[in-house]
């Protein structure tokens, strides 16, 4: 959530930076400022009336001590009381309206973020490795998995509908091996603290990390209990410290969590296509940081490096892009996407999105730290996939496929999987 003081003091700057995202930012900013103007005027009127009531009450007390008639003054005080009650209600309504309007405003892109309208204008920051070469036409992971009996889409569809999968046999074992490998890498080598969070979440948690109210249609909701299935571990993990004031010395906090993720993907292009590319339920290891504002962008670079290290260790070719203003996520001020090469798709697939949210999420969840100046300040929050499955699963199968239909596994996975390859 943006700081209302920023909108009051620098409205043109806010409009310009939001405009670079696309859409009508002027009208939305103007609506917030108009509501803020009305709310402040109401509160000023309230303060004046309360001062008048206090003054009159003192006068009534004095007049009574002098034996004077105070009926007229007492009537005036009652009238002020009625007006104060109405204004309290009006102020509360305006305060709620202002918060709702602020919750609908996206974060400001970083001033140095590349300006662009869509993903086609995202610049490549770096690449690692080279695409593998084959002496045969590489197959899709769907065909590889069918040959090796790793996945069962038909039976999963019978149970849950389209865009679900059942990992079977060596496929289930590889999925479990990857989860353990990713958690060990992020915790034992990169210093994140492992968390196993709840998967059912209160609406307030999703408001805190900005999935609500903007992305309601993408979420699975349990209406009877007013709880949501976690769309990503970012939500429960970042909210661990909601409404807290952290000691300055505790920062940065670094967490890693494995969870299944649940997304309706309403209106998403590609949903229902063959394979694992876009699913309603998928596994992910998420990494989250809560940091001092002065170190946030430095921490974003290290978080992104931690995610990239996964692909380097596994020997998978990838590229890292920076999202332009028109492609930034709602709450992010700066984002790197890591895209792994999938030979069977002849395309790059996003396996991690690493973002700095500034104080945007912290304001929504009231997450602060005690500064050296003795004052409370909002933390900055960051997160990224470290990394997401099943696209990592796809890249592994397609990169390391062999002419006989088997799949060789990179050495770091051998001890987790219990073998060096998957064979028929």
Image: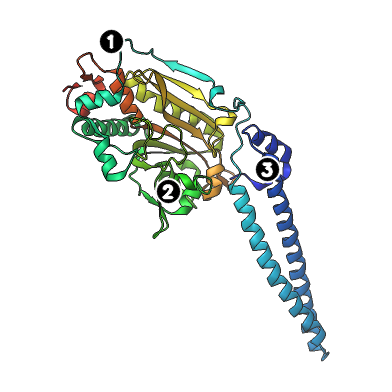
The residue under label 2 is 240
Residues at marks 2 and 3 touching, judged by CB atoms closer than 8 Å = no
Disc 1 or 2, which lies upstream in sequence? 1
Which quadrant does the C terminus fall into? top left
Does residue 375 appear in this view? no
Which element type, helix, strand or loop, lies under badge 1? loop
Residue occupying the far bottom of the picture? 67
Q: As rendered, which of 274 and 169 lies closer to the eye?
A: 274
Left or right: where does residue 266 sit relative to residue 56? left
Left or right: where does residue 91 sit relative to residue 245? right
Q: As rendered, which of 249 and 38 lies closer to the eye?
A: 38
Which element type, helix, strand or loop, lies under badge 3? helix
Disc 2 or 3, which lies upstream in sequence? 3
The residue under label 3 is 6
Q: Nearer the viewer, mark 3 or mark 1?
A: 1
* Image coords of residue 156 (percent x, y): 27, 40
The residue under label 1 is 136
Name which residue lies at 28% across and 8% down: 135
* Image coords of residue 306 (percent x, y): 40, 27
The crowd level at tag 3 (other Cα within 10 Å; few <14, some 14-19, many 20+) is few
Q: Quadrant of residue 178?
A: top left
Residue 163's place in the image compared with 424, above or below, is below
Name which residue lies at 72% across and 75% down: 81
């Amino acid at each position: 959530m943006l700081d209302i003081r920023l909108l009051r003091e620098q409205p043109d700057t806010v409009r310009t930076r939001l405009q670079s995202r696309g859409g009508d930012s002027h009208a939305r900013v103007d609506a917030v400022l108009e509501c803020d103007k009305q709310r402040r005027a109401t509160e000023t009127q309230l303060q004046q009336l309360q001062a008048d009531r206090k003054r009159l009450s003192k006068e009534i007390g004095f007049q009574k001590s002098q034996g004077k008639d105070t009926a007229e003054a007492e009537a005036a005080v009652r009238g002020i009381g009625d007006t104060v009650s109405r204004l309290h209600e009006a102020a509360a309504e305006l305060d709620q309206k202002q918060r709702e309007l602020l919750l609908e405003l996206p974060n400001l892109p970083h001033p140095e973020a590349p300006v662009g309208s869509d993903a086609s204008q995202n610049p490549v920051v770096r690449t690692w490795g080279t695409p593998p070469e084959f002496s045969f036409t590489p197959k899709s992971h769907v065909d590889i998995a069918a040959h090796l009996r790793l996945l069962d889409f038909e039976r999963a569809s019978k149970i849950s509908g389209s865009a679900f999968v059942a990992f079977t046999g060596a496929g289930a074992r590889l999925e479990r091996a990857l989860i353990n490998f990713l958690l060990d890498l992020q915790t034992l080598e990169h210093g994140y603290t492992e968390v196993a969070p709840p998967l059912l979440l209160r609406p307030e948690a999703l408001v805190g990390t900005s999935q609500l109210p903007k992305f309601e249609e993408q979420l699975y909701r349990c209406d009877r209990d007013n709880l949501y299935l976690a769309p990503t571990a970012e939500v429960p993990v970042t909210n661990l410290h909601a409404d807290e004031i952290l000691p300055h010395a505790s920062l940065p906090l670094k967490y890693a969590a494995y969870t299944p993720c649940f997304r309706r993907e309403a209106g998403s292009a590609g949903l229902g296509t063959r394979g694992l590319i876009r699913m309603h339920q998928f596994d992910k290891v998420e990494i989250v940081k809560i940091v001092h504002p002065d170190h946030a962008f430095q921490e974003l670079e290290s978080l992104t490096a931690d995610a990239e290290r996964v692909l380097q260790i596994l020997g998978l070719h990838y590229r890292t892009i920076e999202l332009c203003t028109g492609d930034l996520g709602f709450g992010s001020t700066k984002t790197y996407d890591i895209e792994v090469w999938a030979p069977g798709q002849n395309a790059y697939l996003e396996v991690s999105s690493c973002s700095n949210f500034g104080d945007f999420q912290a304001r929504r969840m009231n997450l602060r730290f005690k500064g050296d100046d003795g004052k409370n300040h909002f933390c900055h929050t960051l997160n990224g996939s470290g990394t997401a499955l099943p696209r990592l699963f796809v890249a592994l199968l397609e990169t390391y496929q062999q002419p006989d239909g088997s799949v060789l596994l990179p050495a770091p996975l051998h001890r987790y999987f219990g073998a060096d390859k998957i064979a028929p």
